Image: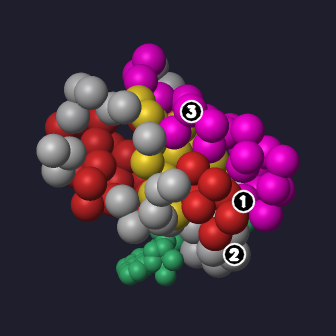
Amino acid sequence: MKALVTGGAGFIGFNFIRYILNNNNNFEILNLDALKYGSDPANLKNFAENDRYSFVQGDISNYTLVSELIKGADAVCELCSRNPCRQEHLSSRGISAKQCEWCIHPS
Ligand SMILES: NC(=O)c1ccc[n+]([C@@H]2O[C@H](COP(=O)([O-])OP(=O)(O)OC[C@H]3O[C@@H](n4cnc5c(N)ncnc54)[C@H](O)[C@@H]3O)[C@@H](O)[C@H]2O)c1
């Protein structure tokens, strides 16, 4: 399973990614973060050696970028502080932005 996490360099996103990587070996995480206010790039170093983790610096308002990244995603967790993910990204994949619970407790 692959999860696209947005805002993963922030407080909630970092802790969410850490939890998933430590507790669920079935998940790969792709973190999309613009490294704006609230981000702590030092957080990202914690995952640098984990082969189930990758990072892209970019803005979720970049429709082309998000459309590309979301192609391989089974779940999206939108944890940016602002600019909620455009719904057309999500509905085009038939997935909901409210799947964090599903990531933590996959059936
Ligand atoms: N911190 C809390 O206690 C708390 C509680 C309840 C809900 N929330 C919600 O959780 C979300 C995250 O909160 P947080 O405390 O982790 O915020 P944060 O400011 O610590 O982190 C936000 C992250 O989003 C990134 N970001 C912002 N705009 C972006 C954009 N356009 N594109 C890509 N990345 C972008 C920033 O670079 C940063 O890394 C917010 O929606 C917040 O309202 C937070």
Return the x and y of residue 64 as percentages of the image width and height: 84, 48
Task: Tell me which amino acid carries mark 1.
Answer: Ile
**Residue drawn at (82%, 56%), measured in percent from left and top?**
62
**Looking at the image, how many numbered discs can be counted on the residues?**
3
Quadrant assignment, res 50: top left
Dot 1 beta carbon under 8 Å from ligand 1: yes
Return the x and y of residue 103 as percentages of the image width and height: 29, 49
Q: Residues within 10 Å of mark 1 (few under 14, many from 20)?
A: many
In the image, residue 44 sits, relative to residue 47, either above or below, namely: below
Task: Tell me which amino acid carries mark 2.
Answer: Asn
Please provide the residue range marked out in magenta.
50-73
Q: Residues within 10 Å of mark 2 (few under 14, many from 20)?
A: few
Quadrant assignment, res 11: bottom left
Q: Is residue 92 visible?
A: yes
Foreground residue, 4 or 40? 4
Considering the image in quadrants, where does the C terminus appear?
Answer: top left
Q: Which residue was labeled with disc 3?
A: 72
* Mark nearer the N terminus (3 vs 1): 1
Q: Which residue was labeled with disc 1?
A: 60
Query: Image check: 59 left or right of 100?
Result: right
Return the x and y of residue 91 as percentages of the image width and height: 59, 61
Q: Are marks 2 and 3 in contact (CB under 8 Å)?
A: no
Look at the numbered disc 2 and give the secondary structure of its residue.
Answer: loop
Query: Image check: 58 left or right of 13?
Result: right
The Cα atoms of the two marked residues, 3 and 1, are separated by 16 Å
Dot 2 beta carbon under 8 Å from ligand 1: yes
Q: Residues within 10 Å of mark 3 (few under 14, many from 20)?
A: some
Task: Tell me which amino acid carries mark 3.
Answer: Gly
Dot 3 beta carbon under 8 Å from ligand 1: no
In the image, residue 28 sits, relative to residue 20, either above or below, namely: above
Q: Which residue was labeled with disc 2?
A: 83
Look at the numbered disc 3 and give the secondary structure of its residue.
Answer: helix
